[in-house]
Amino acid sequence: MLIPLLLALLCLSLVGCVAGPQRAEPTAAPALAASPPPLATTVILGDQRPSELPAVAARRERIAAALATQPFVLLRDGLEPRLGAAQTAAVNDPRVRTATLSPTGQPLRSEVMTVAEARAGDVPAEVAATCPPGRCLRVVLYVYPTNSTVTALVDDRLQVVSVQILADAQPEIPEDLAELATQLALADPQLVAAFEGLTPTEAMATMQATKTALETTSCERSRHLCVAPVFTWGSLALWTIVDLTDFTLVAATTWTEQGTSQRRIVVSEATLQDAALAPLCETPQRLEHAGWQAAYLLTSSDGLELRDVTFQGQPVLTSVKVVDWHIGYQGVDGQRVGFSDAVGCPVFSAAAVIPYSLPELSEEPDGSLRLTMTFRSPNWPLPCNYQYSFTATFAPDGTLSVMVGNEGRGCGTEGIYHPVVRIEPPVTTELALVEATGRTLLQQEGFAVWEAGSTQRFDLATEAGPLTVAPIWGDAELAYLYWTQARPEEGQGDLPSIGSCCGLDERQGPEQFIGPGTPEPLGPAPILWFVPRIANAERERCWADTTLVAGATVPEIWPCNAGVALRFAE
């Protein structure tokens, strides 16, 4: 029975989804003389035995104590008084209590992940007046059995003014859990064996706090809270899957080829000036140019959000932002792994990829105004480090173009990128899907798949006239389009990671917002979701490397991008 079981386990399909705190700095690969490199086809099968680490035992004791005493939630320790008072108010709110209890009133394992200032990008429109900057705190809990994220906003009178519960969604991973995941991986003898005599260390680990899921195991569809510390060796990366719900190394890890580099050196980047970014994280900034007016704001984990865009006084766009960057890879052993990157403000969040600099505004030769912001991992362009861009171009003819770009480097040579773009157009009396075969009026939630090069678009009837939303294909090979009802908990505030990062179908996250069974009516304020698929290619697109120029290493970039254009019909 053992051999068939092992063969079955070897056929597991790995699907990773990751978003988490800033990644640790990669270190140079050990000298090859130290020991032979690991086999590129290594597959490690987890035995599902709970870890015997003292740190795990201590954490289990804390969980047991929390479940035995009201409010039955594992709280964050060491908070300053104001944050601690907000945490207490949140976990005792009846709505939060309901989410952390079973239908029969039994406590569910729940944990407060973060307590921090609620920034403008975190606050739904319905409570924006109650929570101006500095007035509210944001308490985020994770409920393990239901795989749910609970977000509570607490005002300065310790009143809970908003509670949002999002199913099948996971918040950012705090530092203590990230460190525990790395310890769990390092303590597993199977991981040590995979390095063929070399003892792996924390210094070799990257991506310790990235969330993941493993198909056909306890992490399937992220139903357990799993993270993926990655250990690098030369041009290979070993992916470990750690289940923080059960404190085990689950099922499998796999090696991916990271591509060749001329020189593999840690690139030194200047420290980001948090003080310079803080105003952008807290208060929307305004721009005006040739009839255009708009605001923009840096969110916790949804990147740069463009808001309230008008042209000659007419509304063009209510909001657009990138909720997640889904990145999937094909391992050398045929398994699929990957990440779901959170992109946002480093001042108050644990986003994986943070701003490299302040937004740039530039006037183009044709009179357009271009707003660009770049987000970068600290050691880009080394492997397992990413650089993303968000660009909005305001043209004199009233066309707004929004492009999302990737400049590598990634963790593999066969990456598939799916940026999840949320578009909130102005209020409309009619939404239609226009295809080569005709025009279809959309009155209920739904989705479609568009092939690259096609001329499909959305037509919206607004007070200012007919507005079109059309794809800019760039390097995309296809795109998934969704249209859903506007609901505060589905993106008016900052969204946690949604969907499965490595899937090659429409399950990218927004599909969960389409009502099950009979689709629900759209209403006058539909949300459009644009998720292009872009495949990277080493030294062709979605790629970066380092090269020597005058004795110094400089990045060499092969970018890729896609986006949408909004314009009033002539």
Image (cartoon, rainbow, N blue to C red):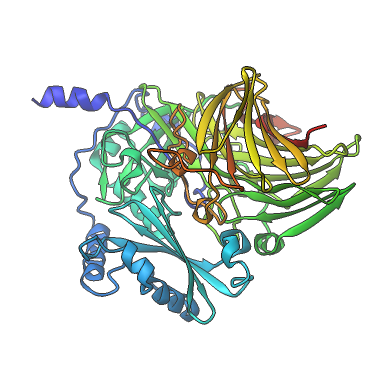
Residue sitting at 30 percent across and 31 percent down? 196
Name the residue: 54% across, 33% down.
418
| Nearer to us in this view, 512 or 254 | 512
Q: Is residue 179 left or right of residue 420?
A: left
x and y, in percent, of residue 100 in the image? 31, 63
Q: Is residue 74 visible?
A: no
Residue 98 in sight here: yes
- The quadrant the C terminus occupies is top right
Whole-percent x and y of residue 432? 63, 32
Q: Nearer the viewer, residue 549 or 87?
A: 87
Q: Quadrant of the N terminus?
A: top left
In this orientation, which residue lies closer to the viewer: 3 or 197? 3
Residue 193 found in image quarter: top left
In this rendered view, identify the residue nearer to me: 28 or 377: 377
**Percent coordinates x, y for residue 341 in the rendering:** 52, 43
Tell whether 229 sits left or right of 525. left
Residue 118 image point, x, y percent: 56, 66
Q: Vertical placement of 298 versus 500: above or below?
A: below
